[in-house]
Image (spheres, helix red, strand yellow):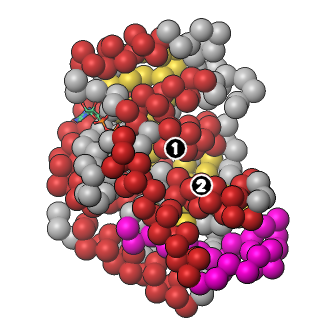
């Protein structure tokens, strides 16, 4: 949690559904910013969410208010969660037609966007929507990023923590590529406190495959039972906002533009007040390189349809 509230900072959240409100709630509890601005096309719902969240602000010093898209466009960070969610059995890429249209109308409503704002994409398919936001928002590419595979990497570390009986904080392992079915685990660079993971325990190839499937299938398993996911992305998005507003510069696997792959895709990047500060090279073996190239090809194919 931030030790002091960042006094004049504002985060706008577009889309006051399950994900948007969980992000708002987490930002408030962790005192990441001074003001959270909530926007939704469903005005009554949005106002009711604001009323409910206001009851949770006691002693946090964080204001929460209903905002117009124009007011949201003037914020320090604009988080986009507006759009359709997956129904059980749907992939994230199945949402592209609907959410491309939603994104277009959201970006139009935000104009003129604060030239120093950072836009954080959360709505799915997050990599493809990050690409289109870089094209349509008018902001420099480093100021537009997607939550990408940070959430998947947290899921991976959670499973490895259980398997190795070591805190997830001491495990450095990344899921890279699409935040979706073509993602891959970068096993060759997974370490525990600097030691390659294979020195800690001999995880077989079958087990690695099984862990990778559990990670990439986790959202679908949750959606099948409860209809949506929200707490994981709430914490993940709030962490990213904190890293930006406090210029903390952690290395996170986030969706951002990569010249090499000609799309927005997740690989480790340093995050700070200007968005993506720099990209960190990740050593990959031949198999992982082929997987990320195939993941990038999947994303480029989606982009080329529009
Ligand atoms: N990147 C990630 O790791 C994650 C992404 N998601 C994605 O987040 C998105 C939202 O999910 P939920 O909150 O569960 O859905 P939801 O249905 O609860 O909320 C979506 C909200 O967007 C609003 N909306 C639609 N069009 C709008 C527009 N033009 N302007 C403003 N608001 C608009 C709707 O009225 C609704 O309140 C989905 O695309 C979902 O797949 C969800 C979890 C994790
Ligand atoms: C829904 C989604 O993208 C997730 O929870 O990973």
Q: Which residue reaches farthest bottom?
A: 286
Which corner quadrant of the figure contains ligand 1? top left
Lateral position of residue 57 relative to residue 131, left or right: right
Q: Residue at x 41, y 43 (%)?
A: 229
The local secondary structure at tag 2 comes to helix
Lateral position of residue 45 relative to residue 30, left or right: left
Q: Which residues are drawn in magenta?
A: 181-205
Q: Quadrant of residue 294?
A: bottom left
Q: Is residue 136 above or below residue 26?
A: below
The residue under label 1 is 232
- Looking at the rendering, in which quadrant would you find the N terminus? top right
Q: CB under 8 Å between callouts 1 and 2? A: yes
Image coordinates for residue 174, horizontal then vertical, percent: 60, 66
Label 2 CB, ligand 2: below 8 Å? no
Q: Residue at x 23, y 54 (%)?
A: 95
Nearer to us in this view, 213 or 233 = 213
Label 1 CB, ligand 2: below 8 Å? yes
Nearer to us in this view, 7 or 202 = 202
Image coordinates for residue 85, horizontal then vertical, percent: 28, 45
Image coordinates for residue 188, horizontal then vertical, percent: 65, 80
Residue 193, magenta (yes or no): yes
- Looking at the rendering, in which quadrant would you find the C terminus? bottom left
Q: Residue at x 59, y 54 (%)?
A: 154
Q: Quadrant of residue 12?
A: top left
Q: Residue at x 46, y 31 (%)?
A: 22
Residue 154 tag number: 2
Q: Is residue 29 above or below residue 269?
A: above
Q: Is residue 223 above or below residue 116?
A: below
């Amino acid at each position: 949690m931030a030790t002091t509230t960042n006094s004049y900072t504002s985060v706008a959240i577009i889309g006051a559904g399950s994900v948007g409100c969980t992000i708002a709630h987490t930002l408030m509890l962790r005192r990441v910013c001074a003001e959270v601005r909530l926007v939704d096309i469903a005005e009554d719902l949005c106002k009711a969410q604001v009323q409910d969240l206001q009851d949770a602000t006691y002693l946090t010093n964080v204001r929460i208010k209903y905002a117009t898209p124009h007011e949201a466009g003037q914020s320090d960070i604009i988080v986009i969660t507006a759009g359709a969610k997956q129904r059980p059995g749907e992939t994230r890429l199945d949402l592209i037609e609907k959410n491309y249209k939603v994104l277009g109308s959201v970006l139009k409503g935000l104009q003129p966007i604060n030239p120093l704002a950072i836009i954080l994409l959360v709505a799915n398919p997050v990599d493809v929507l990050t690409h289109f936001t870089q094209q349509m928002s008018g902001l420099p590419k480093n100021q537009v990023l997607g939550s990408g595979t940070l959430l998947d990497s947290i899921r991976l570390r959670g499973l490895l923590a259980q398997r190795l009986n070591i805190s997830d904080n001491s495990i450095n392992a990344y899921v890279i590529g699409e935040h979706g079915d073509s993602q891959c685990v970068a096993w060759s660079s997974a370490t525990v406190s600097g030691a390659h993971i294979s020195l800690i325990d001999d995880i077989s190839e079958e087990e690695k495959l099984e862990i990778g499937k559990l990670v990439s299938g986790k959202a679908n398993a949750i959606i099948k039972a409860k209809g949506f996911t929200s707490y994981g992305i709430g914490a993940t998005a709030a962490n990213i906002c904190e890293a930006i507003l406090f210029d903390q510069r952690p290395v996170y696997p986030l969706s951002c533009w990569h010249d090499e792959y000609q799309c927005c895709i997740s690989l480790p990047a340093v995050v700070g007040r200007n968005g993506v500060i720099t990209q960190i090279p990740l050593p990959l073996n031949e198999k992982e390189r082929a997987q990320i190239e195939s993941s990038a090809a999947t994303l480029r194919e989606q982009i080329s349809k529009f």
